[in-house]
Amino acid sequence: MTEHAIQLAHKFLNGDEQNALSFIHTVLANNDRLSLYEDLITPAMIHIGKLWERNEITVADEHLATAICDYIISYVEFKSAAMDAASNRKVMLFGVEGEEHYIGLKMATSVFQEFGWKLRYLGPNLPLRHAETAVNAWQPDVVAMSAALSYRLPMLRKSVEVLASVAHKPTILIGGRMSPHAKFEDVAAPGQVVVLQSLRDLHAWLQHTGKGAVTENVIS
């Protein structure tokens, strides 16, 4: 955890969006968005989560910090030059049913956007029956889901089981803090599930798959 990440965490907790924006502008002057998300915002939000777990901040504090972080990410995306879709690949992203954390998903959406993928970001806490309907209707090449808390793992496994079995057999990407602890070999076809532990892992996976067909590359 760097001192800069801790400083940013406190700016989020203070609800100081303008000061946080100035801080972000300084970082972006010498770093790309991936570094901003992976090396600064992600550890800042992890630090805030640990403060909450230790009862050093309230739920209201955590919600305020998340709202400011969301605003910062949206601002960075709006100011960034939009990249024309350079691929026919489609990705649908959402948090599994019951999972309210979504900042990581928004940052992952940005990484897919850099590679020109067509996007549908459905936000956190998407009921599985609605996720299945959406996947069948839009038929994305990739379904990306996240779970940040251990007690979401049963729903995550159930979601993988259901969505991996839809007719067009999408690749399933899994992220979030719980991703290293999840196993899916018994609920999906070999190579269909890819577990990614960081945004840099996602970036590397997208570089490997390129702008053409999605390749099998299971990391679970």
Image: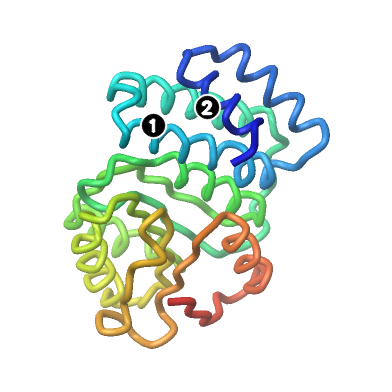
Q: How is the image coloured?
A: rainbow
Q: What amino acid type is highlighted by mark number 2? A: Ala
Q: Which mark is residue 51?
A: 1
At which x and y percent is residue 118?
54, 54
The correct choice, above or below, for 100 with respect to 150 in the image is: above
Nearest to N terminus: mark 2 or mark 1: 2
Residue at 64 percent of width and 19 percent of height: 21
Q: Secondary structure at mark 2?
A: helix
Residue at 74 percent of width and 31 percent of height: 27
At which x and y percent is residue 29?
81, 31
- Crowdedness near tag 2: few (<14), some (14–19) or many (≥20) residues, C-alpha within 10 Å: many
Pointer 2 with pointer 1, Cβ within 8 A? yes
At which x and y percent is residue 163?
28, 69
The image quadrant that residue 11 belongs to is: top right
Residue at 68 percent of width and 58 percent of height: 86
The correct choice, above or below, for 201 with respect to 64 in the image is: below
Q: What amino acid type is highlighted by mark number 1? A: Leu
Position of the N terminus by quadrant: top right
Residue at 26 percent of width and 56 percent of height: 150
- Crowdedness near tag 1: few (<14), some (14–19) or many (≥20) residues, C-alpha within 10 Å: some
Q: Which mark is residue 9?
A: 2
